Amino acid sequence: MTYRIRRSEAPEGIVFALSGDMDAEHTGRLEDLLRTESSGPILLDLQELTLVAREAVRLLARAEARGIRILNCPEYVRRWIAAERNVPASRSV
């Protein structure tokens, strides 16, 4: 399956809807988009995301720490984000 990022504007802020399989390559693409976005609050909608790699989970954890809201997050991804936050920096490589 392919990976897509759709950007839209909503009353709550800028929404990036992610779909497909998110691996290390795709994580970099999303990171670039988030870095350049300056139009207001950002939301990541994971409703159509089918698979995530560890790099993607790390990005999601960093994004949340920066105040980006994550919507429709599968429970296994939510638990994985929480676990990544609890890993000491020296072990998170």
Image: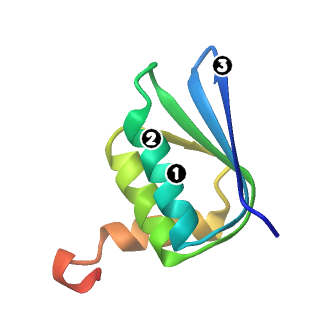
Tell me whether circle 2 and circle 1 mark residues in contact (CB < 8 Å). Answer: yes
Q: Residues within 10 Å of mark 2 (few under 14, many from 20)?
A: some
Q: Residue at x 72, y 60 (%)?
A: 3
In the displayed structure, 52 sits above or below 78; it is: below
**Can you tell which quarter of the image residue 70 is in?**
top right
The residue under label 3 is: 10
Residue 77: x percent and y percent?
A: 58, 67
The residue under label 1 is: 30
The numbered mark, 1 or 3, whose residue comes first in the sequence reads 3
Q: Amino acid at mark 1?
A: Leu
In the displayed structure, 20 sits above or below 93; it is: above
Residue 57: x percent and y percent?
A: 49, 67
Q: Residues within 10 Å of mark 1 (few under 14, many from 20)?
A: some
Closer to viewer: mark 2 or mark 3: 2
Residue 89 shown left or right of residue 49 in the figure = left
The residue under label 2 is: 34
SS at mark 2 in the image: helix
Residue 80 shown left or right of residue 38 in the figure = right
Task: Give the Cα separation between the discs numbered 1 and 3.
Answer: 19 Å
